[in-house]
Amino acid sequence: MLRNYLTVALRQTARHKAYSFINLFGLSIGLACTLLILLWVKDELSYDRFHSNAGSLFRVEQDQTGPQGTFHVNATPYPMGPGLKDEIPEIQDATRHAFPGVLLVRQGSNVFFEERVRAVDPSFLKMFTFPSIRGDAQTALNHPRSIVLTDEMARKYFGNQDPLGKTLTVNNDYPFSVTGVVAKVPANSTVRFDMLVPLDFIKELGLYNDSWGDNEIFTWVQLQPESRVALVNEKITRLRRDRQQQEFAGDAETLEAIRKRAGPQFMLRPLTDIHLYSVFGFGRRTGTVQYVYIFSAIAVFVLLIACMNFMNLATARAANRAKEVGLRKTLGAFRADIARQFLGESMVTTLLAAGISMVFAALLLPTFNRLSGKELTASALLTWDYLLGVLAVAVVAGTVSGSYPAALLSAFQPVRVLRGGPAAGQRGALFRKSLVVLQFSLSVLLLVGTGVAYRQFNYMRSKSLGYDKEHLIYVPLRGDAPKAYLAFKEELLRDPRVLGVTGTYQEPTYMSSNSWGVDWDGKDPNQRVLIGSAFVDFDYTETMGIEMVAGRPLSRTFAVDNGESFLVNEEVPKLMGLDAAAAVGKRFSFQGVDGTIVGVMKNYHYQPLQYAIEPLAVLVAPEALQFAVVKLRPGDIPGALAYVRSTWEKVVPSYPYEQVFFDQDFGQMYASDERLATILKYFAAMAVVIACMGLFELASYAAQQRTKEIGVRKALGASVPGILRLLLKDFARCVLLANAIAWPVAYAAAQMWLQSYANRTTVGVWTFAGACALTLVVALITVSLQALKAARTNPVDSLRYE
């Protein structure tokens, strides 16, 4: 019987080639899109699960509560790791994960700046599973001057030589011996590095802070089996409070303040949840789970559109197989047998489409990687779990696609169809129209989503930042380069092509350091306020083009401005309960400096536009600068850049030159939003194409069914445009109804998505109008190709048998 089903299915496919091609191609493309997205989702859900201890590894995080709300922090104090391991029995092991900054690494003539050097405790390679290629991971970081490389870094510096025992020099002063090589860190790892050095190196660099009140590094713990996370959370919170009280035991005033206020609440975040569910700051969602939901919805939409195509075409062709069903039933076939046959045909077509879709997916994978920013390989398509997923999707698609046609066809009455009566009647026609409406509703949802995503992306790219980023570059000051900053600045300003030079401690496009310890005259002593801080050089506002609302910029002409005066943004006076002018001249204590506010800057975006502007205080601190910011005169930009480079090589010859345009940073900040918009664009286009392929065949069928009607109308004097309007009217109504259904859903979804942006665009009416116009025009062009052919048919050809 199965052989018979297969034979009939293949025979039907060969007999109706155009219909079969549209069915098979539409399903294959829909399945290929779905499989690519499933591969992406699988990769997102697989983050960090390759570690053998993944289920027992946690990152220590905390909630800090104040009048502005709850601020979530992922960093911890330096001493916390050893303290947790020593004091909390449920914690089996702990390690810290610090960032020593960008380091200059030298081996002979090989000299590179390395951004992904991490300082960790020796237990790091015991807790996390990064397979060792050379050396012993258990002891590789025991020596204070040991360094572990990934195999990529080993080849970069030593080629094919054995790197063990060889020396790398860091920042021209610190020799490290290579004690281990580990495999390349997988792309689906939250913890990423190129080199590992002992945490003691942080002390050598003067970056270590043994206070329990400052949060600067990540702390990871491994719990004992059967440990209760909630209980451990309470113990961490209590331990931190006790240690901070011990730290300030001799300072009665500070100790009393610590006891009065509600301290931070610590909690453990499972390693396997970090990539998807991370949060930072005032509720900023930095995890990717939102994109997993969006991409999964896209996969379901595209697959449903392809399945509806199949159902629509199958029911439209029902009349052509009515006599076959009637004869089978007359010869004794049961309805269940016929239903199984048609469902089996659907399943054969779907499985064949699944095989073709695997080929399409493999061919499209490089393009999909480029669009999504992934590094997925074709081998991922052949893993057993993925193949099982493909089979499951194909079976579901085959069942969904074939269920209604099988039920409809098996219900035909043999007496009725063998007499030449209508097979499916009005119910079949109504069902087909309903599917067309649903197909285009889903397509409109994707088109509106694409429009909103591009609208938001363009809004962020074009929105004023509150400063002039045009022709602004910054030069990282690595190693000893900060000592030469003043000489570098003076030399640059000699050239008229350089309009201004200043410096910052943090990357000037993304300053994110926040602190609680702020005070001013009249402040409620029990009120804890979180404020961002920025350490800069003089000429900061002038070089960046930041407007002053009140007061003056920081200036060398005032001695107190060198580390004792503050610039604040407009959010700070709001916290103080003052207007901008009234805040100028007020005492302001922050970051250990008891000074005065000398100026209020107009609010500007010192962080990406996804985040709201928060209070910010700016101090001059020449000794802390890590980046030189240079404003170039418009015109001879290449010449100006060459001058900046030659000046660097003259003043700081021992460090390679780097430069970054501000626009480059903003391009990277909004890369994920651009990727989402681009992927939505392509999948929306696919959805419309698949829907129109089915529409093309349905239009052909509709024209064929009305051949005699068209012939009579033409014989009675109907014009070609009149016939066209007759045939297009029903399809136009379906598309318009689809838009009417999709718009409210699309609007609600778009509003919900935009809520994740502090600075967001509006859902413009033209986005909906554009989606409606596009679907209507494309659908009518598709139908017109068949309608025009039918309208031009000679009535003699259609009526000659009557």
Image (cartoon, rainbow, N blue to C red):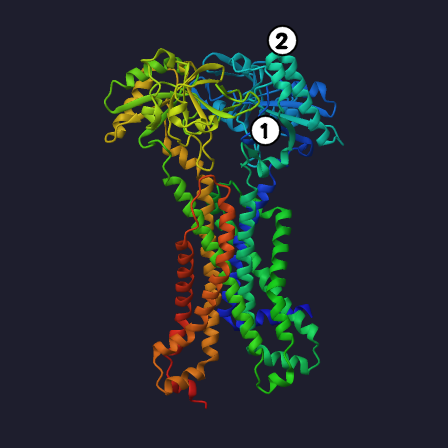
Where is residue 700, by image quadrant?
Answer: bottom left
Q: Position of residue 549 (x, y in %)?
A: 35, 28
Q: Is residue 25 visible?
A: no
- Give the amino acid type for the residue marked by disc 2 in the picture: Gly
**Residue at numbered disc 1:** 65
Q: Would you place residue 446 above or below residue 668 in this image? A: below
Q: Is residue 397 visible?
A: yes
Residue ID at (53%, 63%): 438
Residue on which disc 2 sits: 250
How many residues crowd mark 2 within 10 Å: few (<14), some (14–19), many (20+)?
Answer: few
Q: Is residue 162 above or below residue 316?
A: above
Residue displayed at 41% across by 47% down: 455
Q: Quadrant of the rendered structure where residue 213 is? A: top right
Q: Classify the position of the N terminus by image quarter.
A: bottom right
Between residue 593 and residue 341, name the one nearer to us. Answer: 593
Tell me the tag on residue 154.
Answer: none
Residue at (39, 55) in percent of width and height: 766
The answer to whether residue 265 is left or right of residue 725 is right
- Give the CA separation, mark 2 to mark 1: 26 Å
